[in-house]
Image: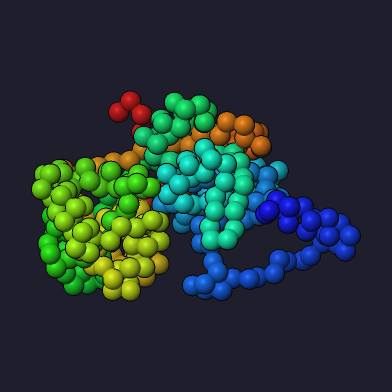
């Protein structure tokens, strides 16, 4: 349906002339799609990027398009990698009453998810472009005095936790829980507190965790440190609590072209760009770590 409407709109434009700007139908907290960006019909490049990179994408794309001015229009999504992978596999995404039937050119995710996509023949040879570690988000001033992952097991601490079914970071966090407090801490946070409401599972953690903290629904949430540092950067009222290396885990970020990419030249150019010093510097400026060999 979306494609039909788009084709009809394009035909109308040919008849009456180009519209200078689209109609803005955004209604805050009612009709808004914060992780869907650009024009899916007129795109020269379509990127599906793991959601925790949403704040990096504007600077990254500006630098890419400066180097590749032929790529004028980019459409991108910044949803959890699991949802993006499923979208690639099933060929569409439904949000409310809208369905987007769109084939991605590029997929960005963590190594484990990328390995699975490559094994399924859905993506090409990936490049590694960044790393990340975990931290915790808390309200400024840290009113619950949260100092370690073990504190998330306390009965008085309400936790925002990514859903293991859709968000790859959840498995990494569970591993960090186990390193900190063994299987008992994992059970407390992921079973006992889920049942009694002390742990709330998110669907898009990079949006819900900070919102729930600021709304007073939860007290803390484990996230990638880049996300917590970004909240500090914009002075949102959230600060980062760092996790010691002995209890932490590291993610490796990879990007690859998608099989059957509609814009193969632009897709390969973007994947190549991810491996440049320019892209690395942009990611580092937002709190990500330097890329590493996947053999390390």
Quadrant including the C terminus:
top left
Horizontal placement of 110 versus 218: left or right? right
Q: Residue at x 19, y 53 (%)?
A: 191
Q: Quadrant of residue 231?
A: bottom left
Tell me, yes or no, if residue 108 can be seen here. Answer: no
Q: Pick whichever, 204 or 241, lies toward us.
A: 204
Q: Residue at x 28, y 56 (%)?
A: 161
Residue 261 placement (x, y as % from top left): 62, 35
In this rendering, is residue 62 above or below 117? below
Residue 263 placement (x, y as % from top left): 66, 37
Residue 200 placement (x, y as % from top left): 28, 61
Q: Residue at x 26, y 67 (%)?
A: 218
Residue 150 placement (x, y as % from top left): 13, 55
Horizontal placement of 21 versus 165: left or right? right
Q: Residue at x 31, y 47 (%)?
A: 164
Task: Give the farthest residue toward the right.
Answer: 15
Tell me, yes or no, if residue 216 can be seen here. Answer: yes
Q: Pick whichever, 135 or 203, lies toward us.
A: 203
Q: Quadrant of residue 196?
A: bottom left
In this rendering, is residue 212 above or below 262? below
Horizontal placement of 279 versus 44: left or right? left
Q: How is the image coloured?
A: rainbow
Horizontal placement of 127 versus 39: left or right? left
How many marks on residues?
A: 0
Q: Pick whichever, 294 or 211, lies toward us.
A: 211
């Amino acid at each position: 349906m979306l494609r039909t409407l788009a084709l009809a709109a394009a035909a109308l434009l040919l008849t009456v002339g180009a519209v200078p700007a689209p109609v803005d139908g955004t209604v805050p907290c009612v009709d808004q799609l914060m992780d869907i960006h650009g024009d899916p019909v007129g795109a020269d490049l379509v990127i599906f990027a793991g959601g925790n990179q949403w704040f990096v994408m504007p600077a990254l794309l500006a630098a890419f398009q400066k180097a590749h001015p032929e790529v004028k229009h980019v459409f991108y999504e910044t949803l959890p990698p699991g949802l993006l992978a499923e979208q690639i596999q099933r060929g569409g995404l439904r949000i409310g009453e809208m369905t987007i039937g769109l084939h991605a050119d590029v997929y960005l995710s963590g190594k484990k998810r990328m390995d699975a996509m490559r094994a399924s023949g859905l993506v090409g040879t990936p490049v590694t472009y960044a790393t990340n570690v975990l931290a915790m988000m808390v309200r400024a001033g840290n009113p619950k005095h949260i100092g370690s992952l073990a504190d998330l097991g306390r009965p008085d601490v309400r936790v925002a936790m990514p859903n293991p079914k859709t968000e790859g970071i959840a498995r990494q966090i569970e591993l960090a829980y186990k390193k900190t407090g063994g299987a008992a801490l994992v059970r407390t946070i992921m079973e006992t507190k889920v049942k009694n409401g002390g742990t709330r599972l998110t669907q898009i953690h990079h949006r819900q965790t900070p919102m729930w903290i600021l709304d007073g629904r939860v007290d803390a949430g484990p996230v990638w440190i880049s996300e917590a540092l970004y909240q500090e950067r914009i002075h949102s009222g959230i600060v980062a609590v760092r996790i010691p290396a002995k209890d932490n885990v590291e993610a490796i970020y990879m990007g690859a072209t998608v099989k059957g990419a509609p814009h193969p030249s632009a897709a390969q150019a973007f994947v190549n760009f991810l491996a440049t010093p320019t892209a690395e510097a942009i990611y580092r400026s937002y709190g990500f770590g330097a890329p590493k060999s996947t053999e390390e």
